[in-house]
Amino acid sequence: MPEPAMGALAGPVSLSSARPWLNRERLINGLLLMALFASPFIAQAVGETYYINLASRIAIVAMAAVGLNLAIGYGGMISFGHAAFFGLGGYVAGISAFHAFDMSLLLSWPITLGGSDFMPGIWLAAMVLCALLALVIGAISLRTSGVYFIMITLAFAQMLYYFAVSWPSYGGDDGLPIYLRNQFPGLNTNDPLTYFLICFVALGLSLALCARLMRSRFGAALTMARLNETRLATAGISPFPIRLVAFVLSAVITGVAGALFADLNGFVGPSMLSWHRSGEIMVIVILGGVGRLYGPVAGAILFVLMETLLGGVTEYWMLFLGLVLLGVVLFARGGLMGLLAGRARHE
Amino acid sequence: MSEAVLELRNLHKRFGALQATRDVTLDLRPGEIHALIGPNGAGKSTLIGQIAGHIAPDEGQIRLSAEDITGLSVAERARRGLGRSFQVSSLADSLSVLRNVMVAVQAIQGHSFRFWKPVDRDASLIEPARAAIARMQLSSRADTPVSELSHGERRQVEVACALALNPRALLLDEPMAGLGPEGSLKLTELLETLKLEVPILLIEHDMDAVFRLADRVTVLVSGEVIAHGTCDEIRTHPRVREAYLGD
Ligand SMILES: Nc1ncnc2c1ncn2[C@@H]1O[C@H](COP(=O)(O)OP(=O)(O)O)[C@@H](O)[C@H]1O
Ligand SMILES: [Mg+2]
C-alpha cells in the first residue's frame, strides 16, 4: 500500500532496477488485506454479526503483532514482554472510560484530570505512556541480549501483571468493565462494522508506518543492527539508541492495539498483561513469518480462526496450535508468508 | 610528532596472563603508509581493536588529530574519521555491497533518526556510496549480495565502507589475505594512490606489498615493538631477521 511503483522510478540512483511492481508477495499481501476487509461485510450480509467482532479481533491482534514484529523481525530484539504494552494500552482505555462513566477524577495532582471517552485522546495517551514504559524497559533490557533479553522483558511484563492484580482501585484481579464503548467523533463506535473499520484502518496505518520506516535511514540502521552490530558501529552508528527507538515504536503500536482490544471486549483485566498474551502475540509473529511485513496479518488470521473454530470444538485446541507452530518452525522457515509468497527478497 | 594524525602512547593490554600489547607507542603521519608486521599472535589485531575502540586498553592513550579518543565508543571514533577493515571480514552478508557501504555514508551525514525518506531513492546516500565502491574498482558488483562475493572482494567492500566515512586515518588488517597474486598487486596499486589522501596503518603479511608500500615499518613480537624504521632499516635489522624474517 505505501510502496510506489519502483519499476517506473528506476533511474540511475535506484538501488536495483529490475524489481517488478507486482510481485507474488505484494499480491498475497493485498489478498490477505482484502479477505480481512471483506469478511465482516459478508458476515453482515448473511446476518452472522458475531463474525464482525471476530474480524475486528483479527485486525487488532494483527496490529499488536505488527508492533512486535518491528522489534523481533526487523530489530532482532526478542521481546517476551509485549503484553506489558498491550495491557497498558488496554488499561488506558479502561481507566479513562471508567472515570468518564462515573465522572470522577483520574488525577488530582499535579493537574486535575477527569476521564474521557474520546478515542483519539485515549490512543494518544496510550502511545505516550507505552513509549515511556518502553523507554525504561528498553534502556535496561537492551543492555543484554539473547536469552537474558527475553527473560528481562518477561520479568518487566510480569511485574506489571502482578501490579494490576494487586491494585484494587481498577478491579484488581477481576479487571475493569467498560460499560460504554469509547467514542470517536462523527462515528458510531457501537456499530460493530464501524468499529471494525476503525480497527482495520489502524492496522493499515501501522503496516504502512512499518513499511515506510524500514525503507528509511532509520530502517537501514536497524537492519544493520540486526544483521551485524559490529558493522553498524564500525560504520559510525551506535546500535543502542537505534534499537531503543525501534523498541519504543514497537511498543507504541502494540499499545494502541491494546486500547482497541479493551474497547472491543468492553473489558480490561490483568490477563491482557500476562505472559500468555506475550506468547500469543509472539506465536502470531512466528506463524505469519518473522520479519515479513504482512506476516502478522497472516498469523493473526490463522491464530484467531484456529482459536475460534477449534476452541469451540475442543478445549485442547492449544495442542493443535502447538502442532501447527511446530510444523511452521520446522518446515516453513518463513512462516505462512514464506509458504504463500516464497522466500523474502534480498534487501 | 605533533603533526601525527594518529598517536598511540604507551598502550598496554593483557588477556589474563597473556600480555597482548606491551608499552606500544607509535604514530601515523599524513601521506604515509605505516606497516605493522609481526608473526601470528604478535598482537597486531589486538592493537587495531584498541585503536578502533572494540577493545579497551588497560593503560595508555590513543589520540586522533591531537584529541584523546581513548574513552570513545567504536561508532564515535568512526564518525571522527577512523576507518577500519577486519582481518575476518565483518559485513551484512544478505545485503548488497551498496547497502553495506551506504550505512557508512549515512553515519557521516548526521544522525540516523530519519524515519521517512526511503534510502533506495536517496541520491545523497547512493552516490557517495557508489563513488567509494568505484574507488575500490567494485562497481560491477555493487548490487550483488555480499554472500556471493569472493574472499578478496569482501575485503575490498570493507575498505570501501571505510572510505565512505571520509576517514582521517585507515586501519587495514591484512587486506591482501586471500586475494591471490593478481588481486594483491591491484590492491597494492590502489593503496599507493589512496595514501596520498588518507594515511594508512597497514597490517600485512605479504612482504612484497609491505616493502613496496610502506614509508615506515613497525615490528611487533609478543605484544612488544622490537624494531621501527624505514623499509631498508627493517630489512637489515638483526633482531627482525632473527625474530620474524626467519634467518
Ligand atoms: N579476546 C581475547 N581474549 C584472550 N586472548 C586474546 C583475545 N584476543 C586475542 N587474544 C590473544 O592475543 C594474542 C594476540 O592476538 P592477535 O592480536 O589476534 O594477533 P595477530 O593479529 O598479531 O595475529 C594471541 O595470542 C591471541 O590468542
Ligand atoms: Mg591478526
Image (cartoon, helix red, strand yellow):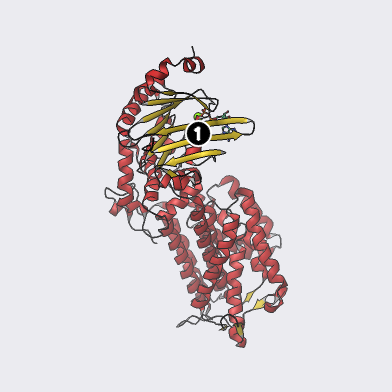
Q: Nearer the viewer, residue A96 or B217?
A: B217
Is B204 placed above or below A232 here?
Answer: above
In percent of width and height, residue A303 lies at: 59, 60
Q: Position of residue A33 (x, y in %)?
A: 46, 63
Q: Is mark 1 within 8 Å of ligand 1?
A: yes
Q: Nearer the viewer, residue A159 or A270?
A: A159
Q: Secondary structure at mark 1?
A: helix
Residue A87 locus on image (x, y percent):
61, 68
Q: Judge left or right: residue A309 versus residue A336.
A: right
Q: Residue at x 64, y 51 (%)?
A: A148
Would you say residue A6 is visible in this rendering?
yes
Residue B122, above or below B142: below
- Which residue, as the protein is rendered here, is positioned at the far bottom? A103
Expressed as whole percent of the image width and height from the top left, the position of residue B14 reads 59, 34
Which quadrant holds the N terminus of chain A?
A: bottom left
- Residue at mark 1: chain: B
Residue reaching furthest to the top: B247
Splitting the image into four quadrants, where does ligand 1 fall? top right
Position of residue A302 in the picture relative to residue B82 (left or right): right
Instruction: Say few, some or many: other residues with alpha carbon within 10 Å of mark 1 (under 14 / 14 to 19 / 20 or more).
Output: many
Q: Residue at x 72, y 72 (%)?
A: A166
Q: Residue at x 37, y 25 (%)?
A: B184
What residue appears at the point 38 percent right and 21 percent down from the top-left corner?
B231
In the picture of the structure, the residue carrying the numbered disc 1 is: B47
Q: Nearer the viewer, residue B93 or A276?
A: B93
Residue B116, picture quadrant: bottom left
Q: Amino acid at mark 1?
A: Leu
Measured along the vertical axis of the image, is residue A203 above or below residue A7? below
Tell me if residue A290 can be seen: no
Q: Nearer the viewer, residue B29 or A150?
A: B29
